[in-house]
Image: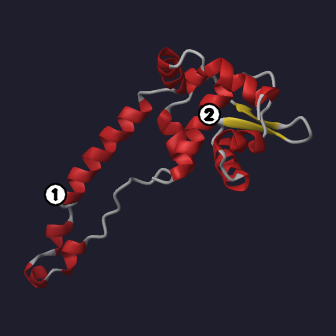
Amino acid sequence: MNEGVEWALHCCLNLAWAGPERAVTAARLAAFYELPTAYLNKQLQALAREGIVSSTPGPRGGFRLARQPEEITVLDVVTAIEGRDPAFQCTHIRKRTPNNGTLLDDDFRQPCLVHQAMARADLAWRRELAGQTLADLKASIEGVAPGAAEGTRGWLLGGGG
């Protein structure tokens, strides 16, 4: 999983704390974490294509959450950045073994046991991510760092940096 997933999740949380009143620029979000603006903007555009954030052009433009935090799952963010393909890609290497000549085409109709195990793990991982929303993450963070929301909002909307 690329680092863009981490960046996107943190930015979505920050946009939730910033609130819907004002858009936050990619440059401001990038400065908050000392990230390259151009690369972060690519992640934000991927989120916009999936309807997770909305983008407003112009001098007062920037990004906002497009939906309520309760309506955005961690899986939504991950798939916006990484795509929907399974993490494991089977290349059917068992077809290239020396004993392949003794196997019939019927032996390859079902995915091999390695593929099946990885598919089960991928499904479990996706279910876990789909079961957690940005609102859940936000509440957990606020529980251990009560000032995070207010501090982040103030910095992003002009009070810091």
Q: Is mark 2 on a helix, strand or loop?
A: helix
The answer to whether 48 appears left or right of 98 in the picture is right
What is the quadrant of residue 129 in the picture? top left
Instruction: Give the class, few, some or many, for how many residues have Cα within 10 Å of label 1's Cα (few <14, many ≥20).
Output: few
Which three-letter amino acid code belongs to the residue tagged 2? Cys
* Residue 136 place in picture, x, y as percent: 48, 21
Query: CB atoms at circles 2 and 1 under 8 Å apart?
Result: no
Q: In this view, does 112 lie to the left or right of 41?
A: left
Residue 91 versus residue 144 in the image, above or below: below
Name the residue rendered at 81%, 28% in the picture: 158
Q: How is the image coloured?
A: secondary structure
> Tag on residue 70?
none
In depth, the one of 94 and 128 nearer the eye is 128
Report the residue that reaches farthest toward the right: 59
Give the vertical position of 147 relative to 130 (above or below): above
The structure residue drawn at horizontal position 56% and vertical position 50%, both measured from the top left corner, is 4
Query: Foreground mark, 2 or 1?
Result: 2
Point 74% across, 23% down: residue: 154
| Residue type beneath disc 1 | Leu
Which quadrant of the view contains residue 54?
A: top right
Quadrant position of the C terminus in the picture: top right
Task: Calculate the distance from the C-alpha at mark 2 to the C-alpha at mark 1.
Answer: 38 Å
- Looking at the image, how many numbered discs can be counted on the residues? 2
- Label 2 belongs to which residue? 12
Q: Is mark 1 on a helix, strand or loop?
A: helix
**Residue 12: x and y, percent?**
62, 33
The first of marks 2 and 1 along the sequence is 2
Q: Which residue sits at x=68%, y=38%? A: 32
Label ID, residue 113: 1
Badge 2: residue crowd in 10 Å (few <14, some 14–19, many ≥20): many
At which x and y percent is residue 106?
15, 69
